[in-house]
Image (tube, grey):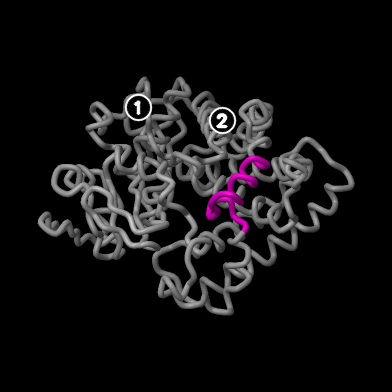
Amino acid sequence: MMKIDSTHRLVDLDPRDTQFYQNPYPTYRRLHAECPIFKWEQYGHWCFSRHEDVNNLLRDRRFGRQILHMATREELGWAEPPQHIKVFTDHEQHSLLELEPPVHTRLRGLISRAFLSRQIERLRPVITDMANTLVDGFADQQEVDVLAAFATPVPVLVICDLLGAPPEMADQFLAWSHDHVAMYMAKRDRAIEDRAVAAVSAFSDYMRQLIAARRKNLGSDLLSELIRAESEGQKLTEDELVTTAILVLNAGHEATVHSLGNGLKAMLERGITGPVTPELVDEILRFDPPLHMFTRYALDDIEYEGITLKKGETVGLMLGAANHDAAKFSNPEQFDVTRTPNAHVAFGAGIHFCIGAPLARLEMQVALEVLCARFPKMSLAEQPHYKDVYHFHGLEALRVKLR
């Protein structure tokens, strides 16, 4: 499945190999032992699998999510993006995930107020009610796909509440989110690009209408907090507001769905149905995280661990591999619900540490608490399988016997 040239630090590994994406952790063990820093031939860039390297590079300001503030496309040898995706690329220019200081510093400072733990904690009873309502919808069944019936709707309903949008918008938000994130996949075609552009346009139009209405009647939702947000007299622009709202949906939904599904799978494979502690939630995130690779650009010519990286080169930081590094975690293949401390990197690190981490942890704890309390004898109905998407590590379905 994998060929390693340790002398030249080259790895030949198809990320779409079923055996790999269904269970990448044995591959990670081998990489840690034989070639922890390597050039992945299929991606064409250097990758780092050790926890120490991933953690260091996430915090290293010589690397960034953006490069065009430091070099022109001509310098980098990049072609101009196709005109037909201009709406999408213009939108991404305002994404907190893609920005670097000083713009990133200003935006994160404004946005972080709405994601403080004390602000998020007020959602606990709201999430509890949502989770119980969803469970009521399938409580009389013997068997259910909890990924579709529970894990998928919980985060999007929470996001509707955060944005002050009616819950009836949940299905439309989901459709827009799926079309949008398809642009980040390794292989995409014109049809995928056209759907992503349409999704960005439609969601942006909807958010502008919602923002206009909220300006006249501010509430306690996140969107109202963002509208209120000020720092040194600078407010978020409307374009930044719109892009942030879309980022809240895409980042807050996809990752939480995968975390809930992957986590419940790990629990049920071991007969665990509670208690759902903060330690359990963090072990889920370490053991089988929703995102396995996070890329960054070298912002200058850099030497790191004997590797020469040129300005503009991409590096791959392997979050899933870092979380299973035996040099950092004792018995990393063991699902230890009491593990503490737990220095996983599922949320990243440094200036791009996930701003929604408190919300994600709360959603996971409350949703799993409700599910386990309602069905303490639930068990897997069949062996679940992961989607053929290496970066976004999540299940196709999770069929569970409720009794």
Compared to residue 251, the image places residue 18 above or below, namely below
Image location of residue 284, percent across then percent down: 40, 33
Q: Which residues are magenta?
A: 94-111
Image location of residue 14, percent across then percent down: 25, 62
The answer to whether residue 168 is visible is yes
Q: How far is disc 2 from disc 1 in space, using C-alphas?
A: 23 Å
Between 350 and 20, the one nearer to me in the picture: 350
Image location of residue 164, percent across then percent down: 75, 44
* The stretch drawn in magenta includes residue 99: yes
Between label 2 and label 1, give the one nearer the viewer. 2
Using the rendered view, name the quadrant where residue 195 is placed: bottom right
For residue 271, the mark is: 1
Image check: 93 left or right of 392?
A: right
Report the number of discs. 2
Image quarter (top left, top right, bottom left or bottom right) of the N terminus: bottom left
Q: Residue at x 70, y 55 (%)?
A: 242
**Local crowd size for mark 1, using a 10 Å CA cut-off: few (<14), some (14–19), many (≥20):** some
Q: Residue at x 34, y 35 (%)?
A: 287
Q: Residue at x 28, y 29 (%)?
A: 329
Label 2, on which residue? 362
Q: In the rendered structure, which amino acid carries the disc numbered 1?
A: Gly
The residue furthest right is 216
Using the rendered view, name the quadrant where residue 223 is placed: top right
